[in-house]
Image: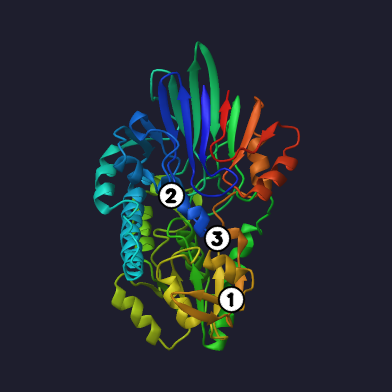
Amino acid sequence: MKVKFCGAAKIVTGSNYLIEVGSERILVDCGMFQGRKNITRLNYQPFKYEPKRISHVLLTHAHIDHSGLLPKLVKQGFKGEIFATDATIDLCRIMLEDSAHIQEMDTKYENERLKFKGKPLRQPLYSKEDVSKTLPLFRKVVYNQEIQVTKHIKVTYRDAGHIIGSAILEIIVDDNGEEKRIVFSGDLGQWDVPIINDPTIVEKADYLILESTYGNRLHEDVKDREVKLLEYAERAYSRGGRLLIPSFAIERTQELLYSFNKLIRQGKFPDMKIFLDSPLAIKATEIFKKHPEFFDQEALTKFKNPFNFPNLVYTSSTDESKSLNDYDKPCVIIAGSGMCTAGRIRHHLKYGLSDPKNIVVFVGYQAYGTLGRWILEGKKTVRFMGLFVDVKADIEKINSFSAHADYEDIQKWVHGFKQKPKKIFLVHGELRSAMELKQKLGKYECIIPGIGDIAKI
């Protein structure tokens, strides 16, 4: 059998892996490349396989860098089944529709520029119509139940503790009568974070395809996140400013709401409105409310509804979002996107980044080449939306909100195997991160594949 690494190899995004067993071909994930232009251009390259020959996609979770090219796959001829958990299917519905909208709008603006220059016009990567053809292909799976995918391939989904509905894939392959067990970690979550369960320990693997996003970093203690949130909110309040939080719509936003809820219930939080200014995050939060079966014990017992509390305001419409420009009291604004590559946060940064009363707090990974990365790295002036904007607001980061395991979490999970993997393939991380994790996992044979590499196992 073969595993071909078609994305998220020596880079963080574009998760996409082809498994071949005889004439059978299935994919694990079909994600979008995100980050700087030379990486996002990979989205427009042909797939490294023939989509029509793929029978199934095993989707680990809903994040766009894992699911975002599914409509392109369908557009180019895939007609098979997409296996995912119930929550992942619900999240993919809103995520893929939002992604298609962004593709169409970005292409429209780009074509106006190309038309002016007399250059050939572009087609969007995919459309809302392509998404509508993709959604009926999803098939619901539940954790811990083995599924016969093809004649020679079986899979069991385990809780990855990354975002709601995320999964570790335990795949068993009959390769000419020899049983081989391949585990895909997907994206692993941290231990002891609110709302969702800890990552599931898997006991057996012949081969492990392991994420390495934070393979060279440690997060702050999860217990300190509310302390820092409160500190930054109080600082913004005392100045009469704004606490601006670029946040990913799924998991990060819900964890932020959970933390704000705790602080308000404890009577510690200043009297300021918290605006959730992201239609996608609002829809995602409704999906969280729909799926309490994925919550951990704390979330089920401490709060009747973790996502509704005093001072929280949902701003769905464009007019409501624009009205925040005229709001003259201290406040918190949570808006997407998490890396500041699109969405309403860019408008809030356009008006608020140059105001020293304000504080911008990053709560997630910022890929190289993104606006969020430039701001976080200390650029004094940044260019976006056709403007040069001076950075005078305070810039802060809370690492413990990351939905990804750090290297200690990854090591803890890997050491849970009772049957030691023969080989570990480190993926879904920048090269430096993967190399440092390889050193930390010294007693295991670790390989760092690149895009297009093939492992015969």
Q: Secondary structure at mark 1?
A: helix
Q: Amino acid at mark 3?
A: Gly
Q: Earlier in the sequence, mark 3 or mark 2?
A: 2
Name the quadrant containing residue 150.
Answer: top left
Q: Which label is found at residue 364?
A: 3
Q: Nearer the viewer, residue 134 or 11?
A: 11
- The circle on residue 392 is none
Instruction: Please provide percent x and percent y for residue 201.
Output: 58, 35
Q: How many labels sit on residues?
A: 3
Residue 389 placement (x, y as % from top left)? 52, 81
Tell me the tag on residue 43: 2
Q: Which residue is mark 1?
A: 232
Q: Is residue 65 visible?
A: yes
Three-letter code, disc 1: Tyr
Residue 141 lies in what quarter of the image? top left
Label 3 vs label 2, nearer the camera: 2
Q: Element at badge 3?
A: loop
The answer to whether residue 295 of the structure is visible from this angle is no
Percent x, y for residue 292? 39, 49
How busy is the neighbourhood of tag 3: few (under 14 within 10 Å), some, or many (20 plus)? many
Which mark is nearer the camera, 1 or 3?
A: 3
Q: CA distance from mark 1 to mark 2?
A: 38 Å
The crowd level at tag 1 (other Cα within 10 Å; few <14, some 14-19, many 20+) is many
> Does residue 307 sit above or below 6 in this rendering?
below
Write the residue at 40% across / 58% down: 304
Residue 222 vs residue 377, the one in the foreground: 377
Q: Residue at x 37, y 30 (%)?
A: 54
Query: Quick one: 201 or 457, which is closer to the camera?
Result: 457
